[in-house]
Every structure is written in C-alpha cells, then in structure tokens.
Image (cartoon, rainbow, N blue to C red):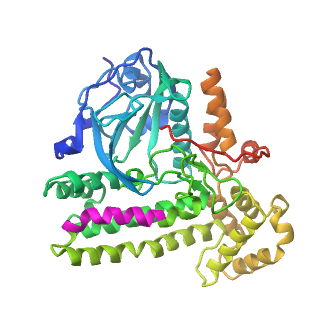
Amino acid sequence: MVDPGWNFDNSYARLPKKLFSTIEPNPVEEPELVVFNESLARTLGLDPEALQSEEGVSVVAGNETPKGSEPIAQAYAGHQFGSFTMLGDGRAMMIGEQITPDGERYDIQLKGSGRTPYSRGGDGRAALGPMLREHIISEAMYALGIPTTRSLAVVTTGESIIRETELPGAILTRVAASHLRVGTFEFIANWGEKEEPQALADYAIERHYPEIKKDENRYLSLLQEVIKRQAALIAKWQQVGFIHGVMNTDNVTISGETIDYGPCAFMDTYDPETVFSSIDVRGRYMYANQPPIGAWNLARFAETLIPLIHDDQEKAIEIAEKEITKFGDLYRDYWLSGMRAKLGIFNEEAEDENLIGDLHKLMKEHKADFTNTFRALTFDKLEEAELFKSEEQWHKRWQERLERQEESKEESQQLMRDNNPAVIPRNHRVEEALEAAVERGDYSMMEKLLNTLSNPYAHTPEQEEYCTLPPDTDRPYVTYCGT
C-alpha cells in the first residue's frame, strides 16, 4: 500500500474508555474522489499524489485503515436547543491524530463513514450535498481568517442515502485542532467517575493550552482561556454576517474553532433577527443572539469544571460565575476592535460604539447588504450603497472621525481592504454550485466558487460577479440540518 505520509499518534484513545468506542471501518461500494484540498494535504505533511491514488482514496473512504490508525467514535453530550441529551459520533470515525512536519497535531475524521454505537435513527452515512456544503463554507471561513475545522477531501460512495428522497452518498475528511467540545465535558461530568473529568481537563490543557499547565489553578485558567477563544470567535462571525444556525453545546469547541456546517449561512440583507435554520422556529440562534448564546454555552462548560476549580462548591460556583460575566465585555472589546478595522479606525474613542451602532441601525432601516455596505465604504463608492444617498450625516461623522487619527487616508483604506471581504459564500452561489455538482456531476461551478473565495480580501475585478445579490424572491432562504 502506498503511504502518503500518515504520521499518527492517538492521544485521545489513551483517555478513559468511557469517552470513546473503538470501531471498525464500514467499507463503501465504489469510492470516488470528487474534491481534494492539495494545499491542506501538504500542510499536514501528506503527499497529494499518493493520497489521490486508489490506495489513498481507499483510506479517506473508510475502506482501509492506514498504519498507526486506531479508529474511534467519540462520546459526548449536549444541550440541543436548551435541552440536555446524550450524543456521540453517530456518523463519524476518527482515524487518528496526524502529527505534521511542524509538530502540530490534527484530528483526521471521516464524516459520513457509517454507523457507530452512538448512531440514532438515520445516522451513519451522509449525503453528497451537505458534505460539499461543509467543504465550501469551512474553506471560505479559513480564507476569511476565522478559526475553523477544514476539509481535506470529499469522496462519493456509490451508495444512495435515503432522506426525503434518494440522494448520492459521500464522506468528508474533516481536519480539526481537536474534536473536544463543551459537550465532551458535559458527558464526562454526568457519566464519568470522579477522576475522569480531571483527566479530560488535563488533556485539554496539554493539547490546547500548555502554557497554563503550571498555573496555580489551571482549571480556572482553562475556563478563562476557552471564554476568550469563544468571545473572539463569535466576534469574528458577527463581523462577516455569519450565522452558525445550531449553537448547541456539542458544537462549541474547546480549541475555539468553528465546527459543524449544517444550517449555517451568511447574511445578505442586514437584519439582526435573521434565522436560516428550518428547525430554529423560535430564533434561538438568530444572528443577534449568537453572543448571549455563546455565554450560555460557556456557563454549561463552567458547570463541568466546578469540582476542579475549588473544593468548596459554593466558592467554585462564585468563581465560575464571575468569569462567565466577563464574556460580555470580552466579546464587546473583540467586536469593537474588528468593527473599527472595518471602518479604517486605528485608535479608540469613546463615541466609536455609537458611530458603529448607528451604521448598523441604518443598514437595517435601509435593508442594506451587509458585505457590500462595507465594500462601498472601503472604496468610497457611496453610489453603490443606497443608504448613503440619504444618510449623509453619518458619513460626515465617520469622515471627521478618520481625520482625528494620525494615520493617512491611504492607511485607513488599506486597513479596510484587509478587513472587509470582497466576497463571501453567498447563499445563492453556494446553492447553484451544489445543484450542479449533485444533480449533474458538474464540479466546475464549485471549483470556480472555491477559487474566488480562497482570497476574499483581494478585491479583484474577477470577484465582482460574486458580489451581486440574489434575485428577489418572496421565499426566505432556508437551510437544513444534514451534516
């Protein structure tokens, strides 16, 4: 068998057995590689040519186990729309942790690889459309500079998946800093033995925050670091109009990466109450709610660390609550910093929050496109944003604000170019690419879209066609779970 360079260590498999199940591969009939991420393969220390060979495809299809692999499915729990339940990898298999030439460690997971001990209902295999969707969105998020899991490959299986209709099956190779979730901690806190939550916490520290190992209270430090990472992550989502759609605690990573791209989407018209998910009927995970839901999820994480933070439970709760209350200010600082950059502002003034808030109010009032509004400001093409034709006062305030800083107009514009993407994965563009690939086997539209999204801050003429808005429709855009 040709070895593309797999260099596995399996540290998670050395944790308490309760946290995972050892599983066997579920071979598929006719694996075919349809999407491959060559640059990511090289980053992982893998030989792209060998990985695209018949033997290499056999591994990412789950038909063969490479040397050093210990396939497992992870157990976890989660608050799903506020209700607690037992969960786990119902359609995913981790084949190992790849150690890169730079010494970095990444989980290699096959999503859609078959049933596991944690499968429920129709779990097991996955359909092609959702796997391609995750590939597009996760790689777009990476290019935007937002921490995220990534996609190495998508393989069709030659099998059909029964949902409402018959769909082509597929497996996605997901690459993550780890798959440790808030839900992983909830699981072990509820069903583990006394020493097992500590073993998981120590593992998370060693893997993601080794700099805090010698802190006086390393478990409190762990909570603080995860809060910081999540506050920074959600601020970045808000700055590009990204709506995750299913911020359950099993989709909140300890590493601070975005994970799970089911009912997610990007806003076109700015509206804080935007919801895309078909199952979020009450708007729990709407755009405006993402920061407070982030704090709620982190409170669930804090609860799992209570016995580790302090021997006195009441004292531990008091300490944890104090840390959770800091999330709001942390998020606000990250968000304000990002929004200042989007407006070309280098320094801080007390009135900045009002200036930024007023712009958002105007965008909502005028039903302005989120991304294109900031593009228009970046290049001073106010005629491209309807709201500035009637709202000259805000523009005047912004110009006066820029004049009060030392940096030149050219420096401000460069800052804006670096922070306002020309392109995002517009929903209608994603859907047309998926339709061409799934319905007609035509991947050219998807490849062109991926190429355009790979450098969103380039602001090239070739990107212009991807800045156009979707056709008017009476039907709101809706996304569905399925990944």
Question: Viewed as shown, does residue 369 lie left or right of 112?
Answer: right
Question: Residue 169, position in %: x, y?
Answer: 48, 24
Residue reaching furthest to the bottom = 350
Q: Say if the magenta span includes residue 295.
A: yes
Question: Viewed as shown, does residue 5 lie left or right of 52?
Answer: left
Question: Residue 325, position in %: x, y?
Answer: 40, 76
Q: Please say if 334 is above or below 72.
A: below
Q: Say if the magenta span includes residue 98.
A: no
Magenta residues, dominant SS class? helix
Instruction: Tell me which residue sits at (35%, 19%) in the image.
Output: 27
Quadrant (top left/top right/bottom left/bottom right) for the N terminus: top left
Instruction: Tell me which residue sits at (28%, 69%) in the image.
Output: 221
Question: Residue 245, position in %: x, y?
Answer: 53, 51
Residue 249, image quadrant: bottom left
Question: Residue 336, position in %: x, y?
Answer: 57, 72
Residue 192 is at least partly visible in this image? yes
Q: Please say if 88 is above or below 359.
A: above
- Residues in magenta, as a range: 293-308
Residue 215 is at least partly visible in this image? no
Residue 5, image quadrant: top left
Which of 237/214 is in front?
237
Residue 449, image quadrant: top right
Instruction: Tell me which residue sits at (86%, 67%) in the image.
Output: 389
Instruction: Tell me which residue sits at (14%, 53%) in the image.
Output: 193
Count the labels in the image. Answer: 0
